[in-house]
Image: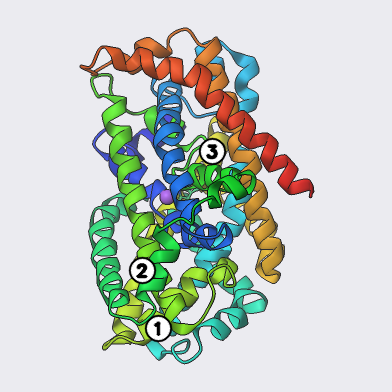
Amino acid sequence: MSSTDREQWATRIGFILAAVGSAVGLGNIWRFPFQVGQEGGAAFLVVYLAFIILIGLPAILVEFVIGRRSERNPIDAFERLGYRAWTIAGLLGVLGGFIIMSFYSVVAGWVTRYTLASATGAYFAEPAEYFMDIAAGTDALLFHLLFMGLTAIIVGLGIQRGIEMAVKLLVPALVALMVLLIVYGFTLDGAVQGYAYYLSPEPGAIAANWTSILPAAAGQAFFTLSLGMGIMITYASYIDDERSLVGDGAWIVGLDTAIAIMAGLMIFPVLFTIGVEPGAGGAGELFIGVGGAIAGLPGSRIIGVLFFGTVLVAALSSAISLTEVTVSFLIDRFGLDRPVATGIVAGGIFLLGIPTALDLMVLELYDQVTAELFLPLTVFLLVLFVGWFYDEALDEVSKGVSADWLPGAWLWHVRTIILVVIGITLILSIQGLIE
Ligand code: PHE
Ligand code: NA
């Protein structure tokens, strides 16, 4: 019964749509500019882009291979492939996803709040102060509850298909609104400074700061691509054999990256114009930056509602994917009813998120620990498995691919470079976290 449940919500045609719905979310629009600000601008962008292309794309294929071959969720997948001990990797991914969801929902709560506040113009006068007022406390908690409740209703009723369809409209709408805000940013006084900060790395900046930039870039890449949480494993379990995993992966990664880059173009000119130093805004970068831009536009209230409303749908489609992994695990493993499983998962996520709703620093800590530790560790294990232990990866990735050299090159890359780079990243992450 439960397996038919999952099949309905991710049909074959729905695959790219569902994967894009999961990938495009707060990671691109909220987390990416926040990381750029934390890590000093363009130097981060360069390392991030290199990481996405050299590690992110091949790593998404690693999850696709496991998913399509096993036709199972991330926890049952390994047993099905005949490698039971590796189930630990799937469990770690689910745990990481569960914790991510606890603060993701708080951030999505801020977005909900801003959708409403746009209608009244509440943040227009003092974008930075407004954010600080609402980011932590009872209000944040209330909106966290609201967002988690909404996610739970959709997952509990099993009506994700509706959201999948909304994603079709969402991506173009989001891109259009972002273009509008980017064009507006271009006209501002701070535009030149903003672009320089974001796009033109100072010589030597990467070399000087790589020990903090690399783990941050890796964490951001995995977070934004929904990697290391078993989501892409789950989605790929529904792809049919004729499709090229490489082609689908490239589409998802390309679109996700484009939207992140646009978020930076939208935000940094505004920050320099209103005199907020990037990095100073921390997790509030998006809200302060875009809030400032929207405030200056004619029709600001409508634009604000549309923009934050669209981001809210993007967050919702990601949150659903995240919640669904744990819910479908409980259904499959313990035979729970969907509404019961959803209630347990959503309740747990809500409780776990309470400290992050009450204290911004706790939120930033949860965020860093999951993105820079849980995700790379899970991806590391998956890469190790596919590269060195699982014999059929090459066969799986070759399906539907016409360039003969590609699968072999991919496997070589997975076995060596990716493993080493993620290994180094992990060491740096651990060092950074204990400091
Ligand atoms: N990738 C999503 C985003 O960028 C977030 C997400 C993380 C979704 C983890 C699912 C799992 O917002
Ligand atoms: Na993303």
Instruction: Identify the element where label 1 is drawn.
Output: helix
Q: Residues within 10 Å of mark 1 (few under 14, many from 20)?
A: many
Which amino acid does the dot numbered 2 rest on? Met
Q: Residues within 10 Å of mark 3 (few under 14, many from 20)?
A: many
Q: Is residue 435 visible?
A: yes
User: How far apart are the alpha carbons under marks 1 and 3?
Assistant: 33 Å
Report, in whole angstroms, how far the alpha carbon at label 1 lies from the one at label 2.
Answer: 18 Å
Tag on residue 118? 1
Residue pointed to by mark 2? 266
Label 3 lies in ligand 1 vicinity (Cβ under 8 Å): yes
- Numbered mark located on residue 229 in the image: 3
Q: Quadrant of the N terminus?
A: top left
Marks 2, 3: nearer the viewer:
2
Determine which quarter of the picture holds residue 431.
Answer: top right
15 sits to left or right of 134: left
**Element assignment for label 3:** loop
